[in-house]
Image (spheres, rainbow, N blue to C red):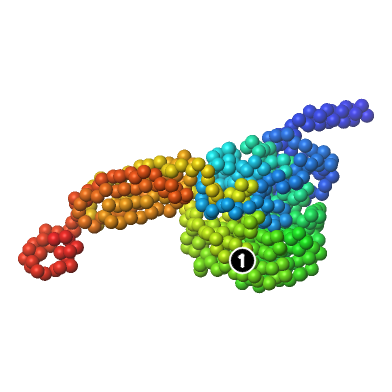
């Protein structure tokens, strides 16, 4: 008996000693289950989902105090996909004074296939395939960057910002979920199956996300609450005011509604994959698109309200205007608007091959729709941002990159519009965060620097490089006068990077290359110049034979004489 008491006392004493170590690691699923009094489901024998590495303070008690995470998300300017956990996509901020001019762009060192979010102070967060989460000030300068061991983004996924400012971001390949303090330090991370959605934060502070095996619900301290197994999920979940969770499955081709405890409220099978993310209207109607070419509308009890044939699959969320009309992009070359009753209002056609893949529209308070599109996607023709009026009239559009664009635009309190893009293999400019708005006290770019040979051969393509800085970080293009009555202008690029351009002169002579940098607001630098001479011509083999031939027959071969300038 005395030995038993001693053993119990020793165990109790060891537990007391172990309590501080919870700030470093939580390894026991049974302990978490007993302390939280919740049902935990662990379907992955090869992954310890409750193995959470903690690098900050952890609150853990029976009631699971998440009060600091409970939303009033109105303080953040755009904290998650679709603005809130209902994914309405309608900002309270106006862009009426936004002229659609790119005021700055911030370069990452790899692709940026994620979408940004914005906190209460206007700090913009986005991830990149350089394994970093970036925090950018509203003026386009770096606040901090957080290093991970994973790529961020594949289908335009967005991080989520909790009410207390914690940023939740998921890697998509090594598959880790990170909780990061607003100052850029890590709170915790945990291993998960490969996450393929944005992070949804519900009004009660819970985290929801989809992955290769189903949907997870996780407490904000990293503890797994439950997993719903349904096969792959690329549909970012939406949560209504009663904490019912809605999402679609790829493998199951089904739209689901789950109770907060992870059990099924109702489900509806569609005719194909469900990549689209649900949107919940103020009246409780749930909208969700499927790759079976239909957009579905459900009452909260799961009864089908209507379905409308759209002629294409949807890989984003519908966004809602104040009247309840829906706006969304489609896989097959169009942007559409549908009434709350399911009638098609208009279709904005895109060129053949253009696709909206993953980009959810953002609607401003002044009724402008912003959405990203991929140009000639099958040929990887680039990406653009498009601005439309609510009636489908084009306001402006701009090409941003030479690779597929999957990101969603977001709107800040000052009316700025932000979106990410990627380029294919350009060493100095793989991915960007772009910012569109006006700029006060804008300064012209600095005078460019030209590098290249001072002489060369005619009819030979010669490479010249151009570089110019801009104190405002405003994107710039180069206007080039080659001195032979030909001119060209490059596309906009990040200031400070080297742009290569090739040119061919056809006649011998001395030429002066002149170049100036022009920012997106039209301000110009001084001209830079470089004198080049083309004293040499390219001689084909046996050129002496051709010269003898021309001398022997002085009136023959006029075309050859012209080509050889003889």
Residue 347 is drawn in which quadrant? bottom right
- Counting the numbered discs, the total is 1
How far across and how far down the image is residue 37, in percent? 84, 45
The answer to whether one can see residue 213 in this image is no
Against 313, residue 13 (above or below) is above
Residue 491 or 383: which is nearer the viewer? 491
How far across and how far down the image is residue 98, in percent? 56, 52
Left or right: residue 8 versus residue 73 is right
Residue 133 or 251: which is nearer the viewer? 133
Left or right: residue 315 versus residue 37 is left
Residue 509 or 21: which is nearer the viewer? 509
Against 177, residue 82 (above or below) is below
How far across and how far down the image is residue 550, in percent? 10, 64
Residue furthest right as drawn: 1
Residue found 20% across the figure and 54% down from its top: 508
Left or right: residue 552 versus residue 219 is left
Residue, disc 1? 391
The answer to whether one can see residue 416 in this image is yes
Residue found 87% across the figure and 31% down from its top: 8
Dot 1 crowding, Cα within 10 Å, few <14, some 14–19, many 20+: some
* SS of the residue under disc 1: loop
């Amino acid at each position: 008996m005395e030995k038993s008491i001693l053993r119990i006392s020793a165990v109790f004493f060891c537990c007391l000693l172990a309590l501080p170590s919870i700030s470093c690691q939580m390894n026991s699923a049974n302990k978490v289950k007993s302390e939280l009094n919740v049902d935990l489901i662990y379907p992955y024998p090869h992954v310890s989902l409750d193995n959470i590495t903690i690098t900050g303070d952890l609150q853990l008690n029976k009631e699971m105090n998440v009060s600091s995470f409970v939303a009033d998300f109105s303080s953040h300017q755009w904290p998650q996909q679709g603005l809130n956990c209902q994914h309405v996509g309608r900002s309270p901020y106006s862009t009426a004074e936004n002229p659609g001019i790119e005021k700055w762009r911030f370069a990452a060192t790899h692709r940026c296939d994620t979408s940004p979010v914005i906190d209460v102070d206007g700090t913009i967060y986005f991830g990149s395939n350089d394994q970093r989460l970036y925090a950018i000030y509203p003026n386009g300068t770096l606040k901090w960057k957080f290093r991970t061991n994973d790529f961020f983004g594949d289908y335009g996924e967005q991080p989520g910002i909790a009410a207390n400012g914690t940023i939740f971001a998921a890697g998509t390949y090594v598959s880790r979920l990170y909780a990061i303090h607003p100052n850029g330090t890590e709170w915790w991370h945990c291993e998960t199956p490969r996450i393929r959605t944005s992070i949804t934060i519900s009004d009660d502070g819970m985290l929801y996300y989809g992955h290769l095996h189903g949907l997870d619900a996780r407490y904000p301290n990293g503890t797994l609450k439950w997993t719903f197994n349904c096969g792959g999920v690329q549909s970012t979940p939406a949560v209504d005011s009663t904490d019912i969770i809605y999402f679609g499955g790829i493998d199951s081709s089904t739209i689901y509604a789950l109770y907060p405890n992870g059990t099924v409220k109702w489900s509806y099978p569609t005719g194909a994959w469900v990549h689209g993310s649900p949107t919940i209207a103020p009246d409780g109607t749930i909208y969700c698109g499927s790759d079976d070419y239909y957009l579905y509308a459900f009452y909260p009890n799961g009864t089908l309200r209507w379905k409308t044939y759209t002629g294409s699959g949807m890989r984003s969320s519908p966004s809602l205007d104040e009247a309840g009309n829906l706006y969304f992009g489609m896989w097959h070359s169009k942007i559409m608007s549908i009434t709350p009753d399911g009638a098609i209002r208009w279709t904005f056609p895109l060129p053949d091959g253009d696709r909206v893949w993953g980009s959810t529209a953002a609607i401003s308070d002044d009724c402008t729709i912003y959405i990203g599109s991929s140009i000639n996607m099958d040929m990887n023709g680039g990406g653009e941002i498009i601005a439309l009026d609510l009636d489908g009239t084009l306001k402006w559009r701009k090409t941003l990159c030479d690779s597929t664009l999957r990101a969603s635009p977001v709107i800040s309190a000052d009316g700025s519009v932000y979106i990410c893009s990627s380029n294919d293999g350009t060493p100095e400019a793989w991915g960007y965060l772009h910012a569109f708005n006006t700029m006060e006290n804008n300064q012209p770019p600095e005078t460019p620097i030209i590098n290249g040979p001072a002489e060369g051969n005619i009819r030979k393509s010669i490479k010249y490089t151009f570089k110019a800085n801009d104190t405002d970080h405003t994107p710039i293009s180069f206007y080039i006068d080659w001195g032979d009555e030909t001119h060209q202008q490059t596309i906009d690029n990040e200031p400070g990077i080297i742009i290569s351009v090739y040119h061919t002169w056809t006649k011998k002579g001395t030429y002066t290359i002149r170049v100036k940098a022009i920012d997106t607001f039209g301000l110009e630098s001084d001209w830079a110049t470089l004198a080049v001479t083309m004293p040499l011509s390219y001689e084909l083999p046996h050129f002496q034979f051709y010269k003898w031939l021309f001398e022997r027959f002085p009136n023959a071969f006029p075309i050859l004489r012209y080509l050889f300038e003889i």
